Amino acid sequence: MIKTLMMKRVFYSLMIVLFIGALARSAYFYTSLKTNVDALNATSSMIQDVLSQRGLLDSFTHVINNLFSILMIETATFFASVVALIFLLWFIFRLYLIEHSNALIDPLTGIYNRRAIMLSLDHEKTRAERFNHKLSAAVIDVDFFKNYNDLNGHKAGDKALKKVAKIVDKSMRRTDFFGRIGGEEFMIVFPETKLSDAQKLCERIRLNVLNADIDFEENMPQKALTISIGVAEMQDSEIKHHNSDVFDQADKQLYIAKLAGRNCVR
């Protein structure tokens, strides 16, 4: 994401330089063309006077018209080349953005993939440390998902994962980051959020998934497809000594939630 912003700045700077260069080149081309045309007109007038006396004026006029046609073609070609170059650069840049975006998106659920959510977490940890802000993270696991897949098939499992991801995504704040870290596990990064507030947000997310209508959930142990969530806050010791990680702590809390019977927030 940060790399994308830098590439955008580089690209726009390149576009500005190219545009200014094209304008400068156009001004020089116009000035040069005007000077040459003025000189050509003066020379043409002198030659016309001489040729008119010898009856060759029509042939000379035809030659001059051809020269002007060639100049106009050269001018049009120059501007067409500049426009084509600008569109080519824009097309290449758009392809780069699409490819870069695909590298950060989970193809199944359409949310961030593991690489992207971890980059977001690292970025927010650096920002929290620098400005002494709060930071919390949550690890989510879909309960008994292997049983769901075994009973209903992987196609239904993929559909259920997409449904859960959509519910969680809609339940979050716009400032939070959400991604899939593998299989049926997800992670949320809560910038500038203390532990108690993050737990409240996660409880709302848990209830939204619990109350959602998901295909074949009646076959699950709790007659519903549920999630367990572990939540942790980045502590001062982590900032000072880097001997723990908020992701690891949230993962441990998820394990505690599973031991507590699942379908809960810890």
Image (cartoon, helix red, strand yellow):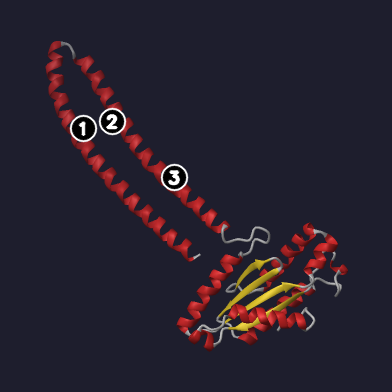
Marker disc for residue 88 = 3
The residue under label 2 is 71
Q: Which residue is more in the foreground, 254 or 37? A: 254
N-terminal label among 3 and 1: 1
Crowdedness near tag 3: few (<14), some (14–19) or many (≥20) residues, C-alpha within 10 Å: few
Q: What amino acid does circle 2 point to?
A: Leu
Q: What amino acid does circle 3 point to?
A: Leu
Q: Which residue is more in the foreground, 127 or 235? A: 235
The extreme top residue here reads 55
Q: Is residue 14 above or below residue 227?
A: above
Q: Is residue 226 above or below residue 4?
A: below
What distance separates the C-alpha of mark 3 from that of mark 1? 33 Å
The extreme front residue here reads 243
Q: Which residue is more in the foreground, 26 or 206? A: 206
What SS does tag 1 mark? Answer: helix
Q: Quadrant of residue 44?
A: top left
Residue 207 x, y percent position in the rendering: 76, 77
Q: Is residue 139 left or right of residue 240?
A: right
The residue under label 1 is 37
Residue 40 x, y percent position in the rendering: 18, 29
